[in-house]
Amino acid sequence: MYVFFKAQDSKAFDSAFKEYSREVLKRKTPKPSMLDKLEKFKELISFSDAPAKDRNRGEISL
């Protein structure tokens, strides 16, 4: 996004820049690292009660 200002518009430029910088700073929240996310998901999976996979499912035993 590009915005062009003339020299007479210095007040408008200042106010627009302040508003833009406020929005940019508001959006920048620290993101958790991928390793932290991975550790959380590992913990969730280890505590889940998911059934074990049955590799013999569908086979007919006589």
Image: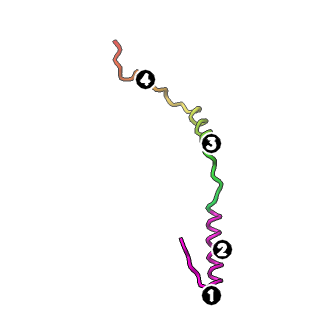
Q: Which residue is pictured at 56% across the width and 76% down the height? A: 3
Asked if labels 3 and 2 touch by Cβ distance under 8 angstroms, the answer is: no
Q: What stretch is highlighted in magenta?
A: 1-26
Q: Disc 2 to disc 3, how far (Cα)?
A: 35 Å
Q: Name the residue under label 3.
A: 35
Q: Mark 2 points at which residue?
A: 18
Q: Mark 3 belongs to which amino acid?
A: Leu
Q: Name the residue under label 4.
A: 55
Question: Mark 1 or mark 2, which is nearer the start of the sequence?
Answer: 1
| Callout 4 crowding tier (Cα within 10 Å): few <14, some 14–19, many ≥20 | few
Q: Disc 3 to disc 1, how far (Cα)?
A: 50 Å
Q: Which of 59 and 3 is in front in this view?
A: 3
Q: Quadrant of the C terminus?
A: top left
Q: Name the residue under label 1.
A: 8
Asked if labels 4 and 2 touch by Cβ distance under 8 angstroms, the answer is: no
Residue 39 rendering spot, x and y as whole percentages: 62, 39
Q: Mark 4 belongs to which amino acid?
A: Arg
Q: Which residue is pictured at 65% across the width and 83% down the height? A: 11
